[in-house]
Amino acid sequence: MAYLGLAACLLFSSKLREYEPLIWTLSSGIIFTTLGCEWLYAIHEEYGYLALRNICFQVLSLILLLTYVNDESDLLLYAWTTVAGSAGVNLINFLRLRKYF
């Protein structure tokens, strides 16, 4: 539903169309957050796993950010780097769900 509303806003708003790639990039985090099922790991009190996983992906994201983002023209690359950090965390969670199912 959220993506349908977002698509409608982008379709009918000429001001937002300029930022369309950036908006779609940042909104892709919604899908990855949904897939991540972080609540399941919190229920099972796997806080060490959650912390280690977050630290690893945030450090990787920071390295990518400092390596590839140089100036204001790299805004979309910055957005992808930011999303990649959280997407990686959530994809690892999703792949590890087999442990419980």
Image (spheres, rainbow, N blue to C red):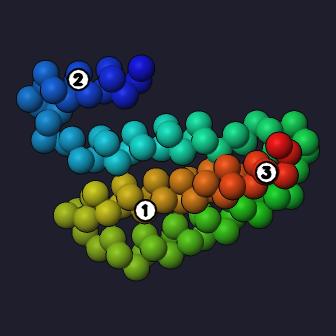
Query: Which residue lies at the image location 90% right of the left edge and 42% below the top edge?
Result: 44
Asked which quadrant contains residue 14, the reply is top left
Q: Amino acid at mark 3?
A: Arg
Residue 49 appears in the rendering? yes
Residue at mark 3: 98
Q: Is residue 68 above or below residue 72?
A: below
- SS type, badge 1: helix
Q: Residue furthest right?
A: 45
Q: Residues within 10 Å of mark 3 (few under 14, many from 20)?
A: few
Q: Earlier in the sequence, mark 1 or mark 2?
A: 2
- SS type, badge 2: helix
Q: Is residue 65 left or right of residue 90?
A: left
Query: Which residue lies at the image location 79% right of the left edge and 51% below the top edge?
Result: 98
Residue at mark 2: 9
Q: Are marks 2 and 3 in contact (CB under 8 Å)?
A: no
Q: Is residue 36 left or right of residue 81?
A: right
Residue 47 appears in the rendering? no
In the rendered image, the quadrant that contains the N terminus is top left
Spot occupied by residue 45 in the image (x, y as percentages of width and height): 91, 44
Q: Is residue 6 left or right of residue 96?
A: left
Asked which quadrant contains residue 81, the reply is bottom left
In the rendered image, the quadrant that contains the C terminus is top right
Q: Is residue 17 above or below residue 4?
A: below
Dot label at residue 81:
1
Badge count: 3
